[in-house]
């Protein structure tokens, strides 16, 4: 799933820095929920576009 980054953070697993407005992608719902609770990710993943698969 893809999530909009609400606040800049460095991912503890990949060490990659995600900037506000960028997209964070993960297959771990648990990790996404952790980041959402901490205020780093937007509440829900953006809706898929018609052409996305």
Image: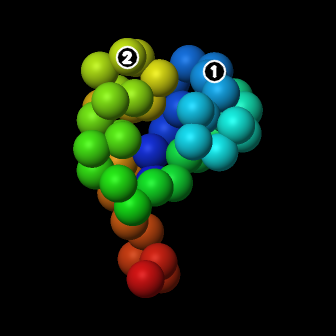
* Residue at 28% in and 50% down: 29
Q: Secondary structure at mark 2?
A: loop
Label 2 neighbour load within 10 Å: few <14, some 14-19, many 20+: few
* Residue at 57% in and 42% down: 13
Q: Does residue 25 appear left or right of residue 50 in this picture?
A: right
Front residue of this view, candidates 45 and 17: 17
Front residue of this view, candidates 5 and 10: 10
Q: Earlier in the sequence, mark 1 or mark 2?
A: 1
Q: Return the x and y of residue 41 as percentages of the image width and height.
A: 43, 30
Q: Is residue 53 above or below residue 6?
A: below
Q: Residue furthest front?
A: 13
State the quadrant of the N terminus: bottom left
Tag count: 2
State the quadrant of the C terminus: bottom left
Any mark on residue 45, and which? none
Say how the picture is coloured.
rainbow
Q: Is residue 20 visible?
A: no
Q: Secondary structure at mark 1?
A: loop
Q: Is residue 8 above or below residue 41?
A: above
Q: Return the x and y of residue 2 as percentages of the image width and height.
A: 45, 54
Q: Does residue 39 appear left or right of residue 43 in this picture?
A: right
Any mark on residue 8, and which? 1
Mark 1 and mark 2: Cα distance apart in space: 11 Å
* Residue at 72% in and 39% down: 16
Q: Return the x and y of residue 7 as percentages of the image width and height.
A: 56, 19
Q: Does residue 33 appear left or right of residue 16 in this picture?
A: left
Q: Which residue is mark 2?
A: 38
* Residue at 40% in and 77% down: 50
> Contact (CB < 8 A) between labels 1 and 2?
no
Q: Is residue 6 visible?
A: yes
């Amino acid at each position: 799933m893809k999530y909009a980054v609400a606040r800049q953070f460095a991912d503890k697993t990949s060490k990659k820095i995600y900037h506000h407005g960028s997209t964070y992608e993960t297959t771990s719902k648990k990790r996404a929920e952790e980041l959402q609770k901490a205020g780093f990710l937007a509440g829900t993943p953006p809706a898929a576009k018609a052409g996305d698969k």
